[in-house]
Amino acid sequence: MSTDIVVIGGGTAGARLARHVPVTVIGEETHAPYNRVLLAEVLAGRYGPEVTALPPVPVRRGVRAVRIDRAARVVHCDDGRAVPYGRLVLATGSNPVLPPLRGLREGRLPDGVHPFRTLDDALALRERARAGARAVVIGGGLLGVMAARALAERGTQVVLAQQDERLMERQLDAQASSLVRAHLEVLGVEVHTECRVRGLTGPAGTDVELADGFVLGAELVVLATGVRPRTGLARDAGLDVRQGVVVDDELRTSDPFIHAVGDCAEHRGTVYGRAGAALEQADALGALLATGRGSYPGTRGLTRLTLGGPRPLDLAAFGEPTPRPGDDVAHLADATRGAYRKVVVRGDRLVGGVLLGDLGAVGTLARAWEGDEPLPDASLLHLLTHDGGS
């Protein structure tokens, strides 16, 4: 029986794990491992694709794992190879969710309709996003906002259609979301919230029909309607799968010889879907495989990004930005500077917050949030005004 460690997936988590222990990485993409966080900058034209490259690790590129034989401990690939393993790590990531729209069939997207998930997606969008072209971004979450900003920086005429009542509803409260919206509108993005898309129409299949019958003419459509963990291999192999592949604190699945990390893994009921969590999981599993000791307690990182433009907007968000009854809330706003800070405290614990424009207090907040320790007896405003470094 093989003692080799085999990793399925050459993305952020798989590449990080390969830096800790000797592994065989099977990667479906033809590109070397790259940093997905920088894809918006590639789309905007700020960076070439080579800038996104992660530290090099050996990967069998362009090879797709099609079946796991748990009894024989072998991974079967689409090139006919059978790769034996002693330990198997699933780092299969996630797939973009394609919304149920008229004129849209999964696997058969019209030319000019793209998800925004991979380097190939970013390069294909960049090739079409010439100045003056008309584009519609469907979805106003984090990914949709980043795509709309990047397209606007290329001179594309952008409409952002968001079904919910505000942008980035998972990370931001109403006031912070309104500042992000204002920033996009300064860049020329036309933002529509509470806007439901019915389907794609027109000769090229790229015109966007709204629920009220109005049609947005477009040459380019970006689908940014969320992602779903890639669990097909795990499910077919009989592993415990809920929203993601279920793992314990040793990132072990229901099979003791198989682990899962990154976007495909569900730990303590949570699928993180963030690069920071994928890196922490890979680090924890790397230490465990190398030494036989260690565990993963979960991730409590902040979401941070910068929305470019003439006046770039820095943003950091974490936890629950919307308070429950009984929570303590403090916020500071400076409309002239476009700055906003807010924290939510439940009992003696920091449970959420958001900062826009001025991240001077992010160091203090990050330590309080990530440490999950009782707060000292001090005013809430101290959390917002103390500059702990960014």
Image (cartoon, grey):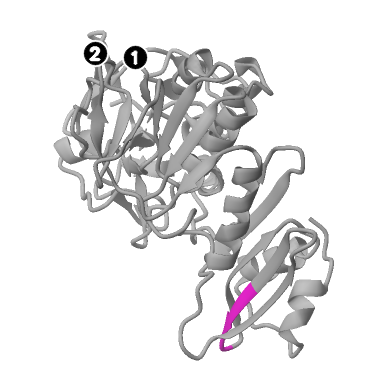
Q: Nearer the viewer, residue 337 or 244?
A: 337
Q: Quadrant of residue 5?
A: top left
Q: Is residue 170 above or below residue 2?
A: below
Q: Quadrant of residue 352?
A: bottom right
Residue 78, label in figure: 2
Residue 117 visible at all = no
> Badge 2: few (under 14), some or many (20 or more) residues near its Cα, within 10 Å?
few
Label 1, secondary structure: give it.
loop
199 lies left or right of 315: left
- Evaluate if marks 1 and 2 touch, with contact meaning CB atoms under 8 Å apart: yes
Q: Which residue is mark 1?
A: 63
| Residue 245: image location, x then y, percent | 29, 47
N-term mark: 1 or 2: 1
Q: Nearer the viewer, residue 202 or 147?
A: 202
What amino acid type should be assigned to the residue bearing mark 1? Val
Q: Quadrant of residue 78?
A: top left
**Picture mark count:** 2
> Going 41% across and 23% down the picture, which residue do you hit?
220
Q: Is residue 129 above or below residue 217?
A: above
| Residue 168: image location, x then y, percent | 49, 54
Label 2, secondary structure: give it.
loop
Compute the Cα span from label 1 to label 2.
Answer: 7 Å
> Badge 1: few (under 14), some or many (20 or more) residues near its Cα, within 10 Å?
many
| Residue 182: image location, x then y, percent | 62, 52
Residue 104 visible at all = yes
The C terminus appears in which quarter of the rendering? bottom right
The N terminus appears in which quarter of the rendering? top left
29 lies left or right of 305: left
What amino acid type should be assigned to the residue bearing mark 2? Asp
Give the prevailing secondary structure in the magenta stretch.
strand
Chain part drawn in magenta = 343-347
